[in-house]
Image (cartoon, grey):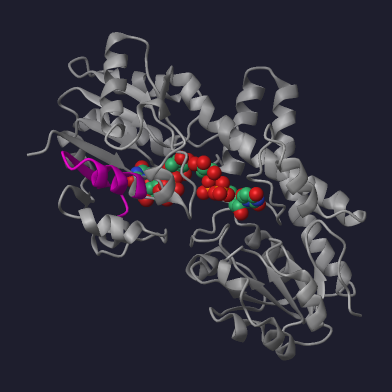
């Protein structure tokens, strides 16, 4: 028999891997994951998870139907659970007040109302989704309104995993953060969550705070990470205009132990479901609390990311003789980063659309993300081909754009590719992962990021 039942509502990129890890580390708990999307649940149950994440399939299948279960029955799951994690999506609002900035909490509130409806006994409700500060308090009010016999303790336990390394991040987290009320029942609930994580995380890495600090910490962590990328990307523009190389600058700056070397790779721009959404959320909060200077400061991180993407496209147009009409351009990579099939907010979407506006013919290649790419560009007018094999995808092209830092792109036979392309052949390395001097020697006109181009003609 199991000690307790953990339920997770939302079987997405966060809920699925997190619960698979908890099930794996805590055989004494039953872990049940529910989702309103039956198709997604069927995929989790099929042994082939709906998301690509290294190590995930093995982890799920080791525990599936032992103490890890996926189901479409949300009501039954809620009734049975002692602890409920909520990891439903919280996109940026597209309508009404705060449109384009604040988080859309409609799924969260609907979920809270479902929890209230089907709960017959006391429960702990854990926020896993990233939410605006003070959401937990609102949820507590919804949960308790008209339900005096059942007590809900709401905790904040933000997820810091990054896609592509989710399993490693979950297995050896830098820290686990738990926010709870400073009351006795709040502290007791925190301890229940500590008991779960203590199965595999050292005590000194499990930190606690009040709920608001925990909610805010998640937004701030993502804002700081994105800020580093925007900072180095801003410098990449300066390096291209001078004789500096952004890689050398990043290395020299990052070796200062106060700064640190991670997250200083200049790129065509950051993507992913979190950074932009969370920063805009932070901006909205600052505006709401009457702090326009602080709001503006953080908004600049997003604006710099837009600038970097625009700059990339403008460089392509300008260097290819100011016309792309009728030219074939191949995007190597469409995922927002390597080792995931996720394309949410991927800079490749923006770049592809801009090239189509210029009437280029585009070919999209990616080892994992072609299905999502097709959906992302479904409404676009123009000539788009999808092709997984990078050699076929580049044959006859005028230019190659490296959009995702997939390892396999580092080891392609670029001589063979060059020979199959139209001349002059252009290569724009939006991730700075290739051997630019060698590409130049082969004959390409090479445009790295953050250093002047290497031209043949
Ligand atoms: C989501 C949020 O986007 C992010 O802010 C948060 O930090 C973690 O949760 P992710 O797991 O990547 O991230 O989202 P997604 O893959 O879209 O998964 C959410 C799942 O919730 C979907 O499968 C969706 O069907 C499900 N869902 C949504 C419900 O089960 N009920 C709802 O009411 C709404
Ligand atoms: C991020 C946070 O890292 C994670 O803690 C949080 O829980 C969710 O949001 P994720 O979006 O999955 O995770 O991936 P991340 O590795 O942070 O990369 C985000 C984007 O930044 C990607 O597009 C990536 O290519 C880009 N990036 C990252 C750079 O352009 N340069 C870098 O140096 C690092």
Q: Residue at x 83, y 55 (%)?
A: 245
* Rendered position, 95 above or below 357: above
Residue 122 image offset from top left, x and y in percent: 19, 22
Q: Residue furthest bottom?
A: 419
Residue at 50% over, 37% down: 104
29 falls in the magenta region: yes
Using the image, determine if residue 1 lies above or below residue 271. Answer: above
* Residue situated in front as seen by the camera: 438 or 300: 438
Residue 246 is inside the magenta segment: no
Q: Where 226 sits versus 427, above or below?
A: above
Which residue of the protein is positioned furthest toward the top in this rendering?
183
Which quadrant of the figure shows ligand 1?
top left
In the visual, does 189 lie left or right of 402? left
How far across and how far down the image is residue 306, in percent?
Answer: 73, 49
Side of 406 where 416 appears, left or right: right
Which image quarter: residue 181? top left
Q: Is residue 455 above or below residue 314?
A: below
Q: Position of residue 308 (x, y in %)?
A: 76, 52
Q: Which residues are magenta?
A: 17-38
| Residue 402, image x, y percentages | 68, 68
Tally of numbered discs:
0
**Can I make out residue 88 in this image?**
yes
Relative to residue 312, is residue 119 drawn left or right? left
Quadrant housing the N terminus: top left
Image quadrant in which the C terminus is located: bottom right
Out of 104 and 25, give the one closest to the viewer. Answer: 25
Report the front residue among 435 and 30.
435
Q: Residue furthest left?
A: 1
């Amino acid at each position: 028999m199991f000690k307790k039942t953990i339920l997770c509502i939302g079987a997405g990129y966060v809920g699925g891997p997190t619960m698979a890890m908890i099930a794996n580390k805590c055989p004494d708990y039953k872990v049940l994951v529910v989702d309103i999307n039956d198709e997604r649940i069927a995929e989790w149950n099929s042994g082939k998870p709906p998301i690509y994440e290294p190590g995930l399939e093995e982890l799920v299948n080791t525990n599936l139907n032992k103490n890890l279960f996926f189901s479409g029955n949300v009501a039954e799951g809620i009734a049975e659970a002692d602890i409920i994690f909520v990891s439903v999506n919280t996109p940026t609002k597209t309508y009404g007040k705060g449109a384009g900035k604040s988080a859309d909490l409609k799924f969260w509130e609907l979920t809270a109302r479902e929890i209230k409806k089907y709960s017959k006994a006391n429960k702990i409700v854990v926020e896993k989704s990233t939410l605006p500060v003070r959401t937990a308090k609102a949820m507590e009010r919804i949960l308790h309104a008209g339900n005096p016999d059942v007590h809900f303790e709401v905790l904040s336990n933000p997820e810091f995993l990054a896609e592509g390394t989710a399993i490693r991040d979950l297995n050896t987290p830098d820290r686990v953060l738990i926010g709870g009320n400073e009351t006795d029942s709040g502290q007791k609930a925190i301890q229940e969550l500590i008991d779960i994580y203590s199965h595999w995380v050292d005590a000194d890495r499990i930190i606690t705070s009040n709920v608001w600090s925990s909610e805010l910490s998640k937004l701030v962590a993502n804002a700081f990470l994105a800020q580093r990328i925007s900072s180095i990307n801003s410098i990449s523009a300066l390096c291209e205009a001078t004789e500096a190389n952004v890689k050398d600058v990043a290395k020299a700056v990052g070796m200062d132990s106060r700064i640190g070397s991670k997250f200083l790779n200049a790129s065509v721009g950051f993507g992913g479901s979190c950074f932009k959404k969370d920063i805009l959320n932070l901006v909205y909060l600052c505006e709401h609390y009457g702090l326009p200077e602080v709001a503006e400061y953080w908004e600049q991180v997003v604006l710099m990311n837009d600038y970097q993407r625009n700059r990339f496209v403008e460089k392509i147009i300008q260097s290819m003789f100011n016309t792309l009409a009728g030219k074939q351009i191949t995007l190597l990579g469409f995922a927002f980063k390597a080792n995931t099939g996720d394309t949410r907010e991927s800079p490749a979407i923006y770049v592809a659309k801009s090239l189509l506006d210029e009437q280029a013919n585009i070919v999209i290649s990616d080892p994992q993300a072609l299905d999502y790419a097709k959906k992302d560009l479904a409404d676009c007018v123009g000539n788009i081909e999808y092709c997984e094999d990078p050699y076929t995808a580049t044959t006859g092209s005028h230019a190659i754009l490296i959009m995702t830092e997939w390892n396999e792109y580092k080891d392609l036979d670029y001589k063979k590719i060059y020979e199959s392309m139209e001349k002059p052949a252009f290569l724009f390395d939006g991730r700075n992962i290739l051997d630019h001097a060698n590409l130049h020697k082969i004959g390409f006109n090479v445009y790295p990021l953050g250093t002047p181009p290497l031209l043949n003609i």
